Amino acid sequence: ECRSTLQHLIIAQMQAPKLAVSTCSRTALSISPRIAHRASSNMASAAAPKYDVVVKGDPEAKKLGDCPFTQRVLITLANKGIEYDQTYVDFARKPDWLMQVSGGKVPVIRQSEKGLNMPDSDVIVEYLEKEHPNPSMKSSAPAELGASFFPTFINFVKAPAEDKDATSKMEAELQAINDYLSKEGNGPLMGGANIDAKDASLAPKLYHACVACKAIKGFDIPEKYKAIKTYFDTLSSKPGWKQTLPVDGDSVIEAGWKAKVASGWSH
């Protein structure tokens, strides 16, 4: 009985008129594996537990504060398309658990499902690149470029006006960055048209320097270094940059550095 039914089905199949496969049908057939892969990837992404990023900010208003090291991690997460939550910490009242995990410093990324409590932006971005390699943010910019920029900036912004050595060192750092961005084939960002790991690390520090130097020293960095001006003009159009800036803007950065300088703070 099974064999007889099978024979009838084969005959019916052979006698049925052949249907032309339309262009749309061929297209649908050709992309269906990719659609399935994308759906699978999206489902996996949706199922993956979110990271929680501990940041400096206002816990009640849920406002992000001014920390270039935290911004580095947030830029990395944003540019890799990784979803995350934020836990805001008032630095005037640091919780005990943060003191135990990182000595009170931010950023820290957490993921309870993995038992992850990871401080230090250097360690965090390396971990994120390993765990989420696509899109890659690896940079071709020289490792030494901007490596000593932040301590040089701190010394400059704290130094008295007559300290010519601090001024010349700051100008040398800025000139090196400007020259690299101006070089044929480079720019407008360290990663060309896209933000890379060097941008994520250097841009927040450079931005803090632009705000603080103008407010405290009357030194307008973008006005003097044209490639750096273009750099920030380009960054301002990138969602991964805009969404990671302090909610209250430059005034928070300016107030923070004025307070640091007044207190004799050192990094």
Image (cartoon, rainbow, N blue to C red):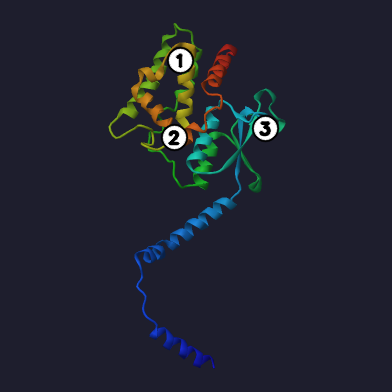
Q: CA gap, disc 3 to disc 1?
A: 33 Å
Front position in the image: 184 or 6:
6
Packing grade of label 3 (10 A; few <14, some 14-19, many >=20) is some
Packing grade of label 1 (10 A; few <14, some 14-19, many >=20) is some
Q: Going 46% across and 16% down the picture, which residue do you hit?
A: 213
Amino acid at pointer 1:
Lys
3 or 1: tag closer to the N-terminus: 3
Amino acid at pointer 2:
Lys
Tags 3 and 2 touching, CB below 8 Å:
no
1 or 2: tag closer to the N-terminus: 1
Check the picture and name the quadrant holding the N terminus. bottom right
Q: Going 48% across and 43% down the picture, which residue do you hit?
A: 80
In this rendering, the count of numbered labels is 3
> What residue is disc 1 on?
214
Amino acid at pointer 3:
Leu
> What residue is disc 2 on?
238
Image spot of residue 56 (x, y percent): 61, 28
**Disc 3 or disc 2, which is closer to the eye?**
2
Check the picture and name the quadrant holding the C terminus. top right
> What residue is disc 3 on?
98
Going by the picture, which residue comes out furthest to the left? 184
Packing grade of label 2 (10 A; few <14, some 14-19, many >=20) is some
Secondary element at image label 3: helix
3 or 2: tag closer to the N-terminus: 3
- Whether residue 168 can be seen here: yes
